[in-house]
Structure formats: structure tokens, C-alpha cells
Amino acid sequence: MASSKIIIAPVLISFFFLAAVLPYESNAKSLKSCGFDAIYQLGDSISDTGNFIQEKPSAVYARFPYGETFFNRPTVPVVSGELNLLGPLQQVQQVFPFLDAYLNPNGTFTRGHGVNFAVASSTALPADFLSKKRIFPPTYSSLSVQLDWMFSHFNSICFSDEKDCVEKLKNSLFMVGEIGVNDYTYAFFHGKTMEEVKNMVPDVVQAIRDAVKRVIGYGARRVAVPGNAPIGFNNLSAYHNDLLKQAIEELKRENPNVVIAYADYYNAFQWILTSARFDAKSTHKACCGTGGDYGYDAMKMCGAPGVPVCPQPDRYISWDGVDLTQKAYQYMALWIIDDILPKLRCPA
């Protein structure tokens, strides 16, 4: 979903980055006051800045039209995942450089840049766990794998003394998600019933909870945990979010010296849908796609030969029937930043 193919992160591409392309200096200044010197991102396509196409160079996301209107080069399904989840938070490019994908052999991982570990199509639950349920995600790089990458990265930048890593990371923002949507959608794709999928939610939320505990153990002192946006099965998304918010409250009690903020992707997306910022006729149509009433065909998606791209992506909410357009992500980023800043308890 992105402009002419820019999928910036379904909601956030990089909180902080998206703001860079928006004329809202007050938000940028507010973010700057937080004093973050790096962002570390975990998640799926909403946040991926290129890890998936490093794993699978032949993926459609590795070629135009993905990325052609943003970086003038393909990046990820969400085209510019660079900002994806950081989206709203990475509101200003001058405050935070784009996050390089961990698997990018030419990435810059010096202090002040942070690292993006997110992988499009990834799941909160491990792939081997899901395979036992006859659910097969397109990547094995689940949340636990991404956390292992993060651990390896921190081992490379910290000295043996654990206090060194805590000191280096105390002014960083950790984004744990958005993730979990793929666990549910792949379950539906493999024929699971609503009841079966709903029964997965506690396990998915527990995986996210465990991930937050791990990053706190690494030295994280400010953590943002996004909920799921509406995915069509909105009661399921709401159930997931309710359990996730309960888990966050428990984590806050267990870690009183750590700021843990819930990022409300669900209501941010609902705000986009109910706003008058997009052509009403395009709210249910994909900009890049073909087939049916919604311009979406799972067997012939955006990037495939012969699949058209709309001439004015900024008038659309959906980029490719899965992710949003750059413009939609920008508006979501604004909503999320405004909502989450007070929760991060940054200095005035």
C-alpha cells in the first residue's frame, strides 16, 4: 500500500521516519526531546526495511513498483519499511536516520542509527510451532529468531560487562512489533476455523510478552508495543489487543523502572477509514492490483506482470491489498505519534 508503490509500513513504517516527510515540526521537536539515540525494531512487513528481500531476492517486493515513489528502489513489501513501525515515532529523518535491515550486508549499524530486525511475513510464534498445527509461514524468521539476531548484534557492540550494554541502550527506543497478524492470517489460509484461530491468541500474546521481557533484559528502558490493526476479522484483532494491553500492564508492574507504551494501531487505522482524507470510492480498492471488487488477487498480486498501478496513489488507502499507501501510513503515523508521546514519558 503505498504510493505508486510505496508501502511504508502498514501503520508506521518507522514512526520517526514518516514524520520526516510531513510538515509537523512540533511533533519532530517533541520526539527530539525524548533524547533517543537509536531505535531497535522487531516485527513484520509493517516495519521491515529489507530483511525479507535479503532472504528471498526473487520476491515481488524486490522489484518495482515497490519503492519507486519513495526511495526510487525496491525495499520490502511495505516498501519502505525503513520506517514502518517506527513510522509514527521516527517522525523526523534528521532526528533518526533510516534503519538499515539487519541482513543488509552494506548496512550502517553504528551508534545513532539503530537496527531493523523486522521481517515481512514473520510470525510471533516460531515456525516449527506453527508447522505442528499445519500452518506454514513464508519465512522462518519469527520473533524469537529476530531476538536472537538482536542478541548477537548487542554482543558485537557491548563489552563483556553487562552494564556496558545497559549504558549503551538506555537512551534507545525498542519497538516490539507490530506482529501477530500473520499468525492469524496464515492460520485462516490453511483452513483453520475462527475458534481455532482465536485459541491461538493467548500463545501469540505470550510470545510478544516474552519478547518484551527479553529486550528489557538486554537493557531496554523505553519500549513501544503496537497492537494489531483491523484485519477484517475485527473482533479477533480487538481480542488480541485486549490481551496484549493486559500483558503490558503486568509487565509494567514487574518492571517499574522501564517505560512500556502500547501503540494503538487499531484506532489509528480506524481514524484513517473514518476521515475524509481519501476518495470514498478508493477506500476499498487496492492502488496496485487487479481482479474482483477490491482490485486484489492473491494469485496475481502487485509486482506481477500485467498488474496495473493507479495513477494517483495518494488518493488510496490500500497500496496492494495487504499494505497501505505511503499517504495512509503518514496519517497513521501522525495519529500514533500524538497518542504515544505522552506514554513514553519523555523529558519536557
Image (tube, grey):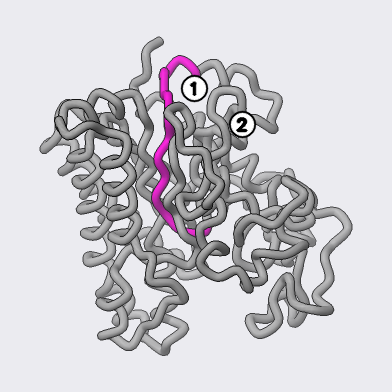
Q: Would you say residue 235 is visible in this rendering?
A: no
Badge 1 element: helix
Q: Quadrant of the N terminus?
A: bottom right
- On whether residue 36 falls in the magenta region, the answer is yes
Q: Residue at x 37, y 86 (%)?
A: 192
In the displayed structure, 196 sits above or below 54; it is below
Magenta residues (range): 32-45
In the displayed structure, 189 sits above or below 212; it is below
Q: Residue at x 45, y 50 (%)?
A: 102
Query: Where does residue 2 sit, x and y in percent of width and height?
Result: 70, 54
Query: Where does residue 332 sit, x and y in percent of width and height?
Result: 58, 42
Bin the neighbour count of mark 2 within 10 Å (Cα to Cα): few under 14, some 14-19, many 20 and up: many
Q: Quadrant of the C terminus?
A: top left
- Circle 2 sits on which residue? 19
Mark on residue 190?
A: none
Q: CA gap, disc 1 to disc 2?
A: 10 Å
- Circle 1 sits on which residue? 31
Amino acid at pointer 2 = Ala
Query: Where does residue 22 sit, x and y in percent of width and height?
Result: 69, 30
Q: Residue furthest right?
A: 311
Badge 2 element: helix
Q: Residue at x 73, y 71 (%)?
A: 303
In the displayed structure, 93 sits above or below 98; it is above
Front residue of 211 and 239: 211
Amino acid at pointer 1 = Leu
- On whether residue 348 falls in the magenta region, the answer is no
In the displayed structure, 209 sits above or below 19; it is below
Q: Is residue 158 left or right of residue 59?
A: left
Whichever of callouts 1 and 2 sits on the residue coming sooner in the sequence is 2
Query: Where does residue 91 sit, x and y in percent of width and height?
Result: 57, 30
Q: Residue at x 69, y 33 (%)?
A: 21
